[in-house]
C-alpha cells in the first residue's frame, strides 16, 4: 500500500479546480477556502462555550465504529461546554458527528457563505464533526455520493483517502459503505490485494479545507481534539440517482439481513469482500 501526499493549493479558481481536481476525481487541500468567512476566527472553544455551552449534545464512543454496531445510537449525553472542556484536557475517544448545531443556532449560518468553486451545493443544513485527541473515524465513503468539502476550524486531523475505483481492493463490505482494513498496519497476509493499492494522505490544519471527491473512501484520525464543518455538493443527476439507490440498498438489504441473520450476515460479507479482492491477487 502506497500513500501519496494530497496537493495543497492556494488561490484555485473554478476553471482550474474543475480541470485538475473535480473532473479527474482527485482530492486537494485548499489553504484559503474559508478566508472570507467570519467563522474562521470566530468559531473557537470560548465562543461555543459561552454561547451554546448549555446545549445537551449526543456523544459516540469508539464502539460505534465496530462492524455491525448501530452507529446511530449515542453512548452518552452532556452539556456542550463540558464536552469542549473534555476535548481541551486530553485524549478522549468521544466524537460527535453529523451534529446539526444549526438547528439550535440558526444564526451561525451567517458566519459562512456558500462556496463559488462549483455548483450543486446541498442547501439543507451542513453538519459539524467533533472529536477528541486520538479518536478515529473508521474507513468509509459517504453513502449519498456527494462531494465533501471538510472545513477544519480547530485541531489537526490526519486523513487517508482511497479512490472509489479501489473499493474491491480495500475489501469493501458488500452492501455497506464500510471497510475494516487496518490503514496504519495493513495485514498483507489477510488482505493481499492491499499490496497493489495506492491512496493519499494529508494532515489537515485549522483554516484549511479538504475536497474529497464523490465516493472517495476516507479514514480520519484526530491528531488533536478539534472540529470541522462539512459542506456537500452534488452537481450531477447521475450521482444523485446513484446516491439514492445506494441509500435504499443500504436500508433495505443490509439492515434486513443484519436483522435476520445477525453475525452470520457479517461473516458472509467478510467472505464476499475477500472473494472480490482475490481477483486482483491472482
Ligand atoms: O471529520 C470527521 O470526523 C468525519 C468527516 C466525514 O466523514 C465526512 O465529512 O464525510
Ligand atoms: Fe464521511
Image (cartoon, helix red, strand yellow):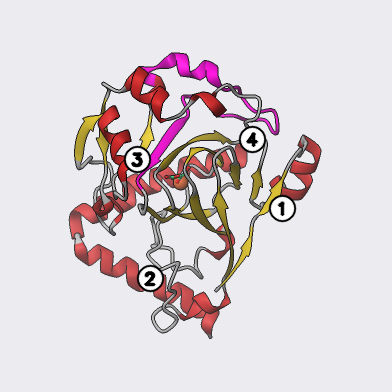
Whether tag 3 and tag 1 are in contact, CB under 8 A, the answer is: no
Residue 168: x %, y % from top left: 49, 67
Q: Is residue 95 visible?
A: no
The residue under label 4 is 235
Residue linked to disc 2: 272
Q: CA distance from mark 4 to mark 1?
A: 15 Å
Ligand 1 positioned in quadrant: top left
For marks 4 and 3, give the one nearer the viewer. Answer: 3
Q: Is residue 133 left or right of residue 155?
A: left
Q: Residue at x 29, y 69 (%)?
A: 268
Q: Which residues are magenta?
A: 103-132
Q: Give whichever of discs 2 and 4 has the lower sequence position.
A: 4
Q: SS at mark 3?
A: helix
- Magenta highlight on residue 273: no
Spatial CA distance of label 2 from label 3 is 42 Å
Residue 161 on image: x %, y %:
54, 58
Mark closer to the observer (1, 2): 1
Residue 120 part of the magenta-drawn span? yes
Image height of 18 relative to 216, above or below: above
The residue where tag 1 is placed is: 24
Amino acid at each position: 500500500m502506497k500513500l501519496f501526499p494530497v496537493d495543497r493549493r492556494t488561490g484555485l479558481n473554478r476553471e482550474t479546480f474543475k480541470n485538475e481536481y473535480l473532473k479527474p476525481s482527485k482530492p486537494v487541500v485548499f489553504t484559503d477556502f474559508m478566508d472570507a468567512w467570519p467563522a474562521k476566527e470566530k468559531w473557537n472553544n470560548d465562543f461555543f462555550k459561552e454561547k451554546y455551552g448549555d446545549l445537551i449534545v449526543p456523544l459516540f464512543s469508539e464502539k460505534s465504529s465496530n462492524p455491525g454496531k448501530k452507529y446511530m445510537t449515542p453512548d452518552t449525553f452532556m452539556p456542550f461546554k463540558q464536552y469542549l472542556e473534555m476535548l481541551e484536557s486530553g485524549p478522549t475517544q468521544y466524537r460527535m458527528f453529523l451534529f446539526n448545531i444549526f438547528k439550535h443556532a440558526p444564526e451561525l449560518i451567517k458566519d459562512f457563505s456558500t462556496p463559488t468553486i462549483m455548483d450543486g451545493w446541498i442547501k439543507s443544513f451542513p453538519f459539524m464533526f467533533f472529536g477528541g485527541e486520538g479518536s478515529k473515524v473508521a474507513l468509509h465513503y459517504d453513502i449519498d455520493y456527494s462531494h465533501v468539502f471538510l472545513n477544519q476550524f480547530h485541531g489537526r486531523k490526519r486523513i487517508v483517502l482511497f479512490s472509489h475505483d479501489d473499493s474491491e481492493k480495500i475489501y469493501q463490505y458488500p452492501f455497506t459503505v464500510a471497510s475494516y482494513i487496518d490503514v496504519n498496519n495493513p495485514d498483507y497476509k489477510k488482505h493481499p490485494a492491499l499490496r497493489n493499492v495506492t491512496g493519499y494522505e494529508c494532515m489537515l490544519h485549522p483554516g484549511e479545507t479538504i475536497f474529497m471527491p464523490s465516493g472517495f473512501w476516507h479514514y480520519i484520525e484526530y491528531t488533536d481534539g478539534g472540529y470541522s464543518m462539512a459542506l456537500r455538493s452534488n452537481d450531477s443527476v447521475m450521482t444523485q440517482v446513484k446516491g439514492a439507490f445506494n441509500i435504499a440498498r443500504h436500508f433495505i438489504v443490509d439492515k434486513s439481513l443484519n436483522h435476520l441473520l445477525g453475525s452470520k450476515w457479517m461473516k458472509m460479507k467478510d467472505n464476499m469482500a475477500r472473494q472480490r479482492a482475490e481477483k486482483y491477487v491472482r
